[in-house]
Image (tube, grey):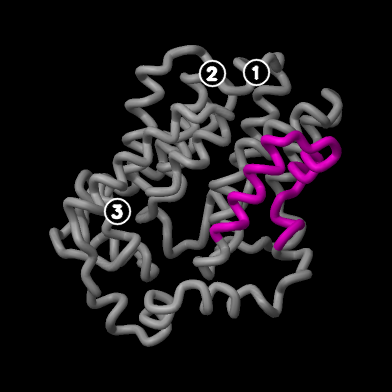
Amino acid sequence: MRLGPDSARYVLAGQGHRVARPFHLRWLLPFVCRDVPRRWWIVWSLSWPLTAAAMVVLALGRGLELGPAVGAAALLVALPGLLGPVVVRPVGVDLPALAVGLWAAALLELGWWPAAVVLVLVAGSVKESTPVFAALWAWHPLLLVGLLAPAIRAVCSRPELDPVTAGNPTLLEVHNHPVRTALEAHRDRARDAWLWLWPWGASLAALVRPSVAVVSTLVAAHAQLLVATDTVRLLHTAAGPVVALAAAEVIPGPLLILAAAASFMWWRRPELI
């Protein structure tokens, strides 16, 4: 199992070691999965059907018929950012956090707010930013209560410069200067369509008549890039549900199947990081 630097820090956390920020806030999956590959694979594998099912439930709750709802789910899981690079498979938090947060949004749409609150607290313990995006997916401030999970964790657990971060000059620079390194990472690709547009596939149809929710979620998703060197993985797991849902509403029914199928196929290898 190949481990990227993020995954290596989750394994360290699972072994009981303190890790650097913000990884110390993402305690739940390392606590559950430890350093056992089989557990990580189970979580990663289950996250796909859970994400798709939550997308269908959310879309149905918004008034879409079953066909467009399934189309929205297909557009979402086809986004390459959900797959991510091989070094975060299966030891990663983005996809599981998306699955849990999306279910929180879906259950809130159905009026099951107590269950939604519990799930968004779980999602906030998987990845600290998920409650913000869950609130945007649901378009309801209640899910911001999930921010209590990372807030409590921040008070109870202090970060520590772990060996993965301290032993790599590049990672140490990113840790010490997140804004500067993030801007440098994206500076030379500011107008690169292969990075910013192509990976969205048919979901770009969401920009035909973008709602306030779509625009707000995209702005919030891109704001992450002010402190992070990754791109597509962060954008798709943050804005993917809203964009896919909006695209399914715009694309005519007979074309939605074709659009979803075309999005699943890579005509050119997309960015995954």
Q: Quadrant of residue 62?
A: top right
The residue shown at (37%, 25%) is 117
The residue shown at (75%, 65%) is 194
- Which portion, as a residue range, is magenta? 196-224
Tag 1 secondary structure: loop
Up/down of 272 relative to 261, above or below: below
Disc number for residue 115:
none
Tag 2 secondary structure: helix
Amino acid at pointer 1:
Arg
Q: Residues within 10 Å of mark 1 (few under 14, many from 20)?
A: some
The residue to which callout 3 is attached is 25
Q: Is residue 192 left or right of residue 21?
A: right
**Nearer the observer, 223 or 51:** 223
Using the numbered discs, state the Cα–Cα distance from disc 1 to disc 3 in whole angstroms: 32 Å
**Quadrant (top left, top right, bottom left, bottom right) of the C terminus:** bottom right
The residue to which callout 2 is attached is 109
**Quadrant (top left, top right, bottom left, bottom right) of the N terminus:** bottom left
Up/down of 64 relative to 49, above or below: above
The residue shown at (85%, 39%) is 208
Along the polypeptide, which appears first: circle 1 or circle 3?
Answer: 3
Image x and y of residue 161, in percent:
24, 74
Along the polypeptide, which appears first: circle 1 or circle 2?
Answer: 1
**Nearer the observer, 187 or 32:** 187
Tag 3 secondary structure: helix
The residue to which callout 1 is attached is 62
Q: Quadrant of residue 76?
A: top right
Using the numbered discs, state the Cα–Cα distance from disc 1 to disc 2 in whole angstroms: 8 Å
Amino acid at pointer 3:
Leu
Up/down of 130 relative to 228, above or below: above
Asked if the residues shown at circle 1 and circle 2 are in contact, with their CB atoms under 8 angstroms apart, the answer is yes
